[in-house]
Image: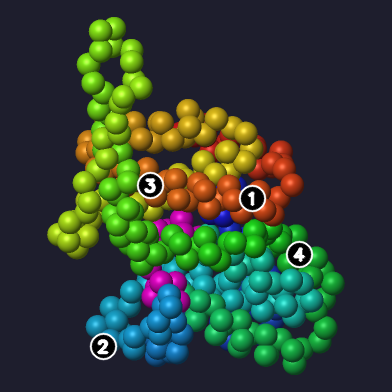
Amino acid sequence: MLLRFSGLLFGLAIALSGHAEAQDPESPPYFNRGDVQRAITRALSAIHTVKCGKAPCAKATTEEFTSPPIDVDEARIALLAGATSARLKWCGLEWKQRAYPLMMQQFQLRGIHDARKLELLNLIHNAQFGRDYAQLQALKTCPEALRASLDKRNPVIDLPPWQRILNNALLDQSVAQMVQRALSEIHQARCGPDKCPASADGTDRSKCEPQLCSPATEAEKANPPITIEQARRAMQIGLMSGVAAFCAIDWRRRIFIPFITYQRRKLAMSERQIAIVAMLHGTMQSFMLKNYREHEKSCTDKMRNGIEKQLSKR
C-alpha cells in the first residue's frame, strides 16, 4: 500500500556507473542532460509497444517528442533506478522489491498518476536495466563489498500481494472509472439527514426514512461534481481507514469524520459531493480491510505505529 512506504527513503544514491555508459560498477552514477533526453526519446519511440491500462498505448505524437510529458528529473530517477536494479541482480540480490518500488513511490509523491507517463518511466527504467545488466555480466564477479553496500542501501520492501491492484486503482483513468461507478449507485446513498415525522417529544425515530440522493443525470456523468484529485484523496483516506480498522483503531472518529468535516466546511462540498467521496472512501476501506484479513494474522506493531504516526501529522 502507498502508506506503507511513507517512512522510506529513496535509496538510489549507491555504487553505480561513473557515467551513463561507463562500466565501473563501484563508481557513483552520473547521467547528463543529453543522456536523459536520449532516454526519453527512446521511450517515446517505444511507447506503443506497451499497454496504458488495459489497452495498448498510442504512438507518440510529434508534440510529445517536442515537449515530452515527463521531465528530465523524472527520467533521471528512472535511469538511476534501472542502473541500481541491474547491479542488484548482478550481485545476486532480489531486485524487484528494492529500487523499483522506491522509484514508483517517488513518482507517486510527485503526483504522477497518469498511466502513459508511468509507462514511459518504466520503459526508461527497463532499458537502462537491460543495458547495464548485459554489460555487467561481462565483468568479473560482483565484489563482496559492493554486494554488501547494495544490500544495506536498498532494503527489500515488503509488498503486499495486492500492491499492483492498488497502484492501478489510484491511476487517473481508474479513479475516473470509480467516480462513474459511484455516480451509477448514488441513488442508494444518503444526501442529507433522515426525514422524520414530527412527534410530541421529538425523540421517536421509528418512522424516519433516509433522504436518498437522486439518480445521476447524463450531464453529471459527463461532468462529475468532484475532481479526479478529490476522488483520489477520498480513496487514499479510505485505505488509511482500512488499515486503522484492521488494527482496531477508531477510524470513524479519528479519520472519517474529520475528513468529511473538512470536505463540508473547508471545501464547501454539497451533500451530493459528500455522498460521492464517502462512497469512494468506503470502497477502498473495504478493499484494504478485506485483503488484510485474508493475508495477515493480526495487526503488527509496525502497522499500528505507522498509522499513528500519520494521524499525528493530521
Query: Residues in magenta?
Result: 106-120
- Residue 101, percent across and down? 59, 64
Foreground: 280 or 308? 280
Q: Which residue, given by chain and number where applicable, does mark 4 sit on?
A: 151
Q: Residue at x 68, y 90 (%)?
A: 135
Classify mark 2: helix, strand or loop: helix
Q: Is disc 1 surrounded by few (<14), some (14 to 19) or many (20+) residues within 10 Å?
A: some
Which sits in the foreground, 195 or 168? 195
Secondary structure beneath label 3: helix
- Sort mark 2 into few (<14), some (14-19) or many (20+) by Cα contacts within 10 Å: few
Quarter-wise, where is residue 162 in the image? Answer: bottom right
The type of residue carrying mark 4 is: Asp
Whole-number angstrom distance, CA of label 2 to CA of label 3: 41 Å
Residues at marks 2 and 4 touching, judged by CB atoms closer than 8 Å: no
Task: Identify residue for label 1.
Answer: 292
Residue 266: in sight, yes or no?
Answer: no
The answer to whether the residue labelled 1 contacts the one labelled 2, judged by CB atoms less than 8 Å apart, is no
Residue 82 visible in the snapshot: yes
Question: Which quarter of the picture shows residue 68?
Answer: bottom left
Q: For the residue marked with disc 2, what is the amino acid? A: Thr
> Please, what is the three-letter code of the amino acid marked with disc 3?
Met
Task: Give the spatial CA distance, label 4 vs label 3.
Answer: 42 Å
Q: Residue at x 69, y 72 (%)?
A: 95
